[in-house]
Image (cartoon, helix red, strand yellow):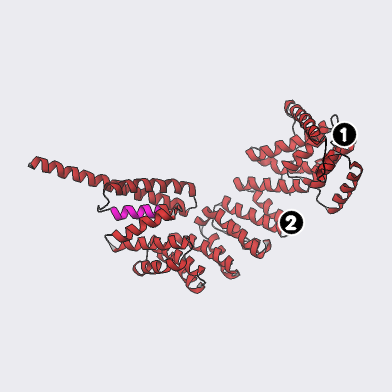
Amino acid sequence: MSKRGAALLGVAALLSGCVYYNAIYNAERLYDEGERAHWAGDDSAASARYEEVIRKAADGYRREPRGEWADDALLLIGRANFRQGKLRAARAALEKAAQDAQDSTARLQALAYLGAVDVRSGDPGRALPLLNEALEGMRHGPVAAEAHLWRARALLEEGRHDEGWWDLDQVEVADPRLRVAAALERLRWGARAGDHLRVREAMSRLLDEPEAGQQVDSILTLVHAVAARWGPEDAAELLAHADAGRWERTDRGEVRLERARLLRAAGDTAAAVGEARDVAGGVGSSAVRARILLAHWQLERAENLSDMHQAVGVLLPAERDSSVAALLSRIDDVSRLSNMGLDDPLALFAAGELARDSLRAPRLAVGLFLAYADAAPDDPWEPKAVLAALEAAPSEGTRAWLRGRLEGRAGSPYVRAARGEPAPGFEALEAELTRRLTNVRRTLASEDSVTPLRPSGGSPGG
């Protein structure tokens, strides 16, 4: 070969190596971005990055499967597949990485994630030797911290609680950036073990970590698990100091709203309303959601149109929000349909359906269905309205009275159908009712908008 040819060949090899290195470098950069999104709880962003990692690292590996960076490529492929939940693909890449690793660090990292694959696959016994070996050679850094996290899970699954809790303590020693993940794990396992002290400690740690606010959905899921095990009162107590935490205001607001729901479920309505009102008096998306929550609580217990309109005052300060505007519009529709019922009683039936289905106001719906039944006692749909009221009625006393009212309409196709009997004429009545209700709604839609009754003030209420 000529000197010029050998030089060109050397340049080509150098360029090929640069392309390979750049592919792995770019994959590593994307993996780091995916990791930041993963630990911040942004699963969609993380997933997109991991897919790119797999594509780029696999392309680089195919170019030079015995190259200098082959084990790095395999590690990236294995770890990204693991994050995606593709355990079979992750295992294959990680086993190959451990086998072909050119240095001990790459091998130990592959073993750590192989152990994690086994834990996630439901085989903690198989995972522990791998994680033990990995941690014998690694003391610090994100992989060591995560190995401690997965070994803790494996040990806790095996019932070796003291060792598992020790490993959770080591997570943030190895890498403080994973302290939120370790606190989440403490909360999860404390709840599973029925350990009130560890659960309270874990929640206190989470509320004291600004980054934990990014995991608010995961935290509230675990709070629901606590509520299912110990009841809503205990779960609400966990969140008692949420407003003193170091999270962003909106995230603190979301937690306080969940506490309000738990307090209400525990029967402490006054405290629930007070908590929600406090959040509603703030700013941001959580304040808007607090107003919607308070309005729904008002609608849930509303028995007449006046009660319904009290929800309007709660919503008005946030009326520019699309969800609030939609709820105000539905309240307005119920009000307008009720007014139309003075001339066309069937509009009262339509108002009852809207109150029941869109406003989630069962008591108001009962009143509207019965208002229609009283206004049109000879209509063939009167029994349907009484049956609808019976289904929505909140008390057994009301339901008993409504069942008695239906006794005189035993021959109605609606009553017969409700009893599981043959009901000739049922389909024809339903078709005609659908046609008439459609006309009622068209009339409503064609009318000029009428400003709903909006009380002065607008302070949050419940």
Front-lying residue, 56 or 100: 100
- Pointer 2 local density, CA inside 10 Å: few below 14, some 14–19, many at least 20: some
Q: Is residue 72 in the magenta section?
A: yes
Task: Tell me which residue sits at (89%, 43%) in the image.
Answer: 410
Q: Is residue 6 magenta?
A: no
In the rendered image, which quarter is residue 454 located in?
A: top right
Q: Earlier in the sequence, mark 2 or mark 1?
A: 2
Instruction: Please state which amino acid type lies under the numbered disc 1.
Output: Asp
Is residue 302 at all visible to an observer of this figure? no
Q: Residue at x 20, y 46 (%)?
A: 14
Instruction: Give the residue number, with chain letter if any, for mark 1.
Output: 379
Span of residues in magenta: 70-80
Query: Where's residue 347, x and y in %?
Result: 81, 33
Left or right? Give the position of 115 relative to 189. Answer: left
Q: Nearer the viewer, residue 137 or 328?
A: 137
Q: Main secondary structure of the magenta part?
A: helix
State the residue position of label 2.
269
Disc 2 + disc 1, Cβ < 8 Å: no
